[in-house]
Amino acid sequence: MQELRNIFQQKFHRPAEAAASAPGRLEILGNHTDYNEGVVLSCAVTQRTAVALAANQSSRINLYDVRSNEYCSFDITKLHEKISPRWGAYPAGVISELQKRSLTIAGFDGVINSSVPLSAGMSSSAAFEIAVLFALMKLFQLDIAPAEAARIGQGVENNFMGLQSGLLDQFSSIFGVKDAFILSDFRTVEVVETAVMAPEASILVVNSMEKHNLVDSEYNQRRQACESAAAKLAARHVGVKTLRDVSSELLHSEKAILSDLEYRRALHVVSECERVRKAIELLKKNDLKAFGQLWWDSHESSRINFENSTPALDKIVELSHTLPGALGARLSGGGFGGITIHLVENSCIAAYREEISRRYCEYCKRMPETIICQPGAGAC
Ligand code: GLA
């Protein structure tokens, strides 16, 4: 943070007045359950995006991004015009969401830096939105409750980027707890429990290096299929509002009223919610083997039912089955490319990392990026 403040001083010849940082996140289990009002087990990571700002007494927003060495400048009254470089749309979206809530701010200068991998499924965009938002809250003394802050970030995705995403990414970035997983309920919109994993295993992220761009993916179509399945079930069952209210037994008994596609999409979501609940019990018992098996089951459900996997993600997960020390692996986040997460016994992790990289590279001539991830603290 001090380094970022120094860069601010160099670029804008005065000290920064406010700074904030927000982490990326890993979805541990509970794939595509958030917008179905379901439950998710996730964590923030130690990779973060940091922002340092100062007001500039004008209507301009002037930003410098250290990682890309790019500048971006736009007018606060022209947020909906084309902003270049494209990353400028995120802060513009945050300001637009603030304006919608009658929270007004003025022009500012800012510098940004980030260690969250881009377009990988670790929520670099949520980390960016929340870091900007928290810094603006400080700079302009805005009083916004944390859950509402998450909704502002989600609003940027929904209204500015055209992605009908849920709350998971921004929520995890804000409510993340150092060294713990959080269990979030997206009906009541709260963290209901935290869970700690036995120290014998670690999480290895293996990035397929296939950029996942959810805006251009079938993400929104998946959401529609879930909602149409839920509507058909709701019409016949009092108490069913979303897929969150559906058990796998109920879904199975009503298979005939759904199209095959709706059934498989719903089955993924319903079974993911069930896996999240099981996972919490298994973590309490320190049963890492059964916990990891849920990761493999989750991936299989993504592959067959939700169809948000890709041949490259499938290949990485297939390789995991053959490696010593493997406890489980799955795609994590929206899917359609991006990262896989692996639960690996600590004693094997170095060899595992090397071997999976080598074999993935042999398969697609692309070296994957691998990161050993620790649950990190939320935005501040
Ligand atoms: C993306 C979305 C989240 C969530 C996940 C899948 O990360 O932004 O809201 O739906 O995909 O669980």
Image (cartoon, rainbow, N blue to C red):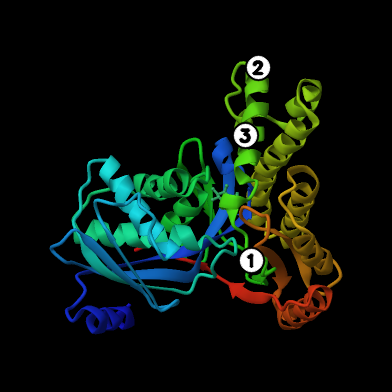
Measuring from the top left, give residue 203's x and y in whole percent.
64, 69
Question: Mark 3 or mark 1: which comes first in sequence?
Answer: 1
Find numbered disc 2 in the image and state the secondary structure of the residue it sits on.
Answer: loop
Q: Is residue 246 above or below residue 291?
A: above
As drawn, which residue projects farthest toward the front?
A: 82
For the C terminus, the quadrant is bottom left
Tell me the SS state at disc 3: helix
Q: Relative to the observer, which residue lies in front, 276 or 45? A: 45
User: Mark 3 against mark 1, which lies toward the viewer?
Assistant: 3
Left or right placement of residue 208 versus residue 58 in this view = right
Q: Which residue is at 25% across, 84% downward?
A: 10
Closer to us: 198 or 67: 67
Which residue is located at x 77 percent, y 47 percent?
A: 301
Say which amino acid is labelled 2. Answer: His
Q: Residue at x 40, y 57 (%)?
A: 90
**Amino acid type for the residue under numbered disc 3:** Gln
Q: Secondary structure at mark 1?
A: loop
Residue hosting label 2: 237
Can residue 125 be seen here? yes
Which sits earlier in the primary sequence, circle 3 or circle 2? 3
- Identify residue for label 1: 198
Q: Are marks 3 and 2 in contact (CB under 8 Å)?
A: no
Which residue is painted at 83% across and 64% down in the image?
318
Tag shown at residue 224? 3
- Residue 248 in picture, x, y percent from top left: 74, 32
Q: Residues within 10 Å of mark 1 (few under 14, many from 20)?
A: few
* Residue at mark 2: C-beta within 8 A of ligand 1: no
Q: Is residue 194 above or below residue 231?
A: below
